[in-house]
Image (spheres, grey):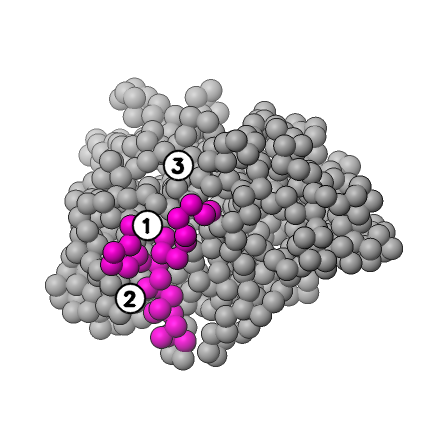
Amino acid sequence: MSSARRLLTAVWACLPLLSVPAARAQSTPPISVDQGSDWDDRVRRAFYLQSQGSELMPLAWLKALKRTDGTPFLAGSLSRYGYLPNPDSRDDLPVGFTFAGPAGGEIAGMTCAACHTRQITVDGKAYRIDGGPAIADFQSLLSDLDVSMAAVVASEAAFQPFARTVLGKAAEDADAVQNLSFFVKAWYDRYHTLMTRALPKTPWGPARLDAVGMIFNRVTGLDIGVPPNTMIPDNIRVADAPTRYPFLWNAPRQDRTQWPGFAENGNDSLALSRNLGEVLGVFGRFHPRPDPFKVLLRYDYLSDNSANFNGLRLLEDAVKKIGPPRWPWTLQATLVERGKMIFERGESEGGCKGCHWPNPGVRWPGEAATWHTPVKDVGTDSREHGIMQWRAKSGVLTGAQIPLVQSMPLKAENECAISILANAVAGSIIQSFNPFLTAAPPGMAPPHLNVLALPQQLRSLANAFPRAGDTSCTSGVPAGTYPYEARVLEGIWAAAPYLHNGSVATLADLLKKPNDRRPSFRIGSNYDIEAVGLGEDQTQFDYTLNTTDCTDRDSGNSRCGHDYGTNLTPDEKRALLEYLKSL
């Protein structure tokens, strides 16, 4: 076998995922907002570059790919989608875009910094906010990658220039070209299947994505079918419940997480569950298979699993160091004090402290204290709760059951998608902790195991699965209610647009009655520091978000709900906004 063919065979495992690539240095570096003494350049670089096991495609493919106009796909460092330059990255990959693997066989992927690093512009100056929700157009990136790869596989004539760039001199080897063609077409078949079935006709737009829907689609639609292609296309549904990227500062302290608040949180093992679900669901290679020799689980979750457990632990350690961004402009001290008093009022008086202030949460044995995270229905858009009810075929995981965690094995048909994901996550973690279950692949060293908290952790994992007799996939959520988490508001000034679905442009708009909030607004990096949020004039993207009112709460774009503070006087609202800037 030629060396080129061996290389191509080695990257057969690159048949996962969703997409993402590169960036170039900008002329004037952004101003880094103060985020505390623990957040320094060393930790920032690690956050930007640490691989978590995400796999998109071989880096060589990505560098060879062209746009439909003939320019490199990575031209402009993907800034056209809102991704940010990373001067420390090789190959001009943007912040949060990574690669891993042997020289010449690197696989490009993505890490959490790509979606959780923000840059805003005020008076022509750029301000970098680490851990902030990205103002990036992920759907356009996904769609354009699909179009560009379609052009590569459209004909032999179209494929030849791509092959010459990827293979170099080895392109003279007909077998190498044939192997490359096979792998590229197989990758494209999976990717195109996902994109055509999952992406909504009404785009998410910049600063938003339906992460839960895409996670369910990725795991149930591409990973758990019968080999060799492992797809179950009928499991893939339109992901049309876009939400705003959450901010990461203080996230490890919450005792619940995810917008619908369905995941318990607050220690390293639960953080691993949260982060592993993100990797497996959106960007990782994951192909479980029945294995009767795995005495406890009866399934092998790790042998064909690209998640980098060690990298996930390092990333979580970095996230713990991200402090809330401090307002970099002048504050009016008297107004801040008055706003503080308004903030601390009760809900009926327009106050915020009851839901949005640090209060003691669940205390895990041997772990740091957490903050209580209220999960309430405040009348906001309901569509993400519909995603939580998705059902799917279980494929090769039919019958899979985690002892002490899962009360019922996975059904072949009509299984809750969240149960399939929870089984994948719990199985992978439990198998990684026990070397007698399998030999973990390189980079899969198990994370710290807190034995004291283990009983509570098992109960927490069990809560992700419906119980016998449940008709809903989300146990504990009363029918007809649509609750979402309420975050502590430190750094909230840097997280526009607002509400979980990003349907309100500024905090000033949020203090208006829902019908008085802007029905449409443009999205981009230009910031209004008076209204606290997105400026009215935007040039970064040619995109306007059109929202619906309270007559269509299930649109995915409803600006309805959370009408706290809407009865305050104009002077009280001004004072409250000044205080929120100071948090």
- Residue that appears at 35% across and 62% down: 463
Q: Nearer the viewer, mark 2 or mark 1?
A: 1
Q: What residue type is labelled 3?
A: Ala
Q: Which amino acid does label 1 sit on?
A: Ser
**What secondary structure is found at the residue carrying circle 3?**
loop
**Residue 85 at least partly seen:** no
Q: Is residue 385 left or right of residue 498?
A: left
Tell me, yes or no, whether the highlighted magenta stretch contains residue 461.
yes
Vertical comparison of 74 with 43: above or below? above
Earlier along the polypeptide chain: callout 3 or callout 2?
A: 3
Quadrant of the rendered structure where residue 308 is? bottom left
The region drawn magenta spans 453-482
Q: Do the residues labelled 2 and 1 touch (CB within 8 Å)?
A: no
Q: Do the residues labelled 3 and 2 touch (CB within 8 Å)?
A: no
Q: In this view, does 395 lie to the left or right of 157?
A: left
* Residue 32 image offset from top left, x and y in percent: 69, 51
The circle on residue 472 is: 1
**Residue 538 at least partly seen:** yes
**Quadrant of the drawing holding the N terminus:** top left
Distance, label 3 to label 2, CA atoms, is 29 Å
Quadrant of the rendered structure where residue 530 is? top right
> Is the stretch drawn in magenta largely helix, strand or loop?
loop
**What secondary structure is found at the residue carrying circle 2?**
loop
Mark 2, residue position: 405
The circle on residue 11 is: none
Mark 3, residue position: 239
Distance, label 3 to label 1, CA atoms, is 19 Å
Earlier along the polypeptide chain: callout 2 or callout 1?
A: 2
* Residue 419 image offset from top left, x and y in percent: 30, 53
User: As rendered, which of 210 and 13 lies closer to the eye?
Assistant: 210
- Residue that appears at 51% across and 40% down: 381
